[in-house]
Image (cartoon, coloured by chain):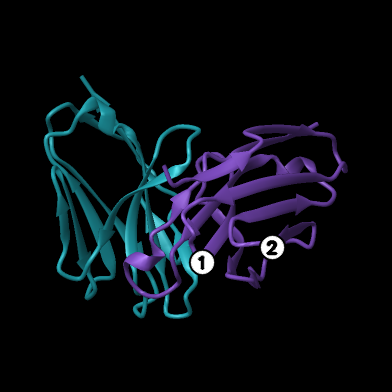
Chain colours: A purple, B cyan
Amino acid sequence: DAMVIQNPRYQVTQFGKPVTLSCSQTLNHNVMYWYQQKSSQAPKLLFHYYDKDFNNEADTPDNFQSRRPNTSFCFLDIRSPGLGDAAMYLCATSRDLREGQDNEQFFGPGTRLTVL
Amino acid sequence: RKEVEQDPGPFNVPEGATVAFNCTYSNSASQSFFWYRQDCRKEPKLLMSVYSSGNEDGRFTAQLNRASQYISLLIRDSKLSDSATYLCDLMDSNYQLIWGAGTKLIIKP
């Protein structure tokens, strides 16, 4: 089945210790997104790739970086995690960014990050 | 005013009842609209797109009211398994994706 896969599902790191979260997709979608979601809050878009074109949200801290080496994979690097970065990190894909159904997003199961 | 607003709930509804909730948005030029369902500690899953003409899928009906700038979700004959948080998502005229914080629905037997 075509899907969005995230690894690991749970990640524990120490304050300030870099961590990398990974996402892969078999949907062959053009767009990949990284979201941060905290309890009872809306998913917060960190950045997205349209193909290789990287788009950073204005309020995404520099502490968060991303790489998309090919269509299938996308990585989220947190250079120096703080306690406030503990959250669920969701990867999503969509076929395109045009109006309509192409914007429907398909999410991976998420990585729950704990910062000690 | 937030760009997208949802009543956080929870809506406590008896099984079999009909329930409806709205999502209001501030940017009149917003385009694509969607409803997602999110179970506790899980990822959001697409429930349905919201077209200008409305959209119906079984017990679920979504409507778009551009004049009043809101979308709605109606659930008929609610099931215990409908208990979840329902998130709205829209794309504005600048292709920015904006999410609501969700409405929590609890269906009681």
Nearest the viewer among A92 and A84 is A92
Q: Which mark is residue A30?
A: 1
Nearest the viewer among A35 and B103 is A35
Q: Is residue B63 above or below residue B27?
A: above
- Residue positioned 60% across, 67% down in the render: A49
Chain letter for mark 2: A
Q: Which mark is residue B32?
A: none
Chain letter for mark 1: A
- Residue positioned 17% across, 59% down in the render: B55
Nearest the viewer among B74 and B6 is B74
Q: Secondary structure at mark 1?
A: loop
Residue A4 image position (x, y, % from top left)? 51, 46
Query: What's the residue type where badge 1 is placed?
Result: Asn
Q: Which mark is residue A60?
A: 2
- 1 vs 2, front mark: 1
Residue B47 image position (x, y, % from top left)? 30, 48
Q: Residue furthest right?
A: A16
Q: Is residue A109 above or below residue A26?
A: above
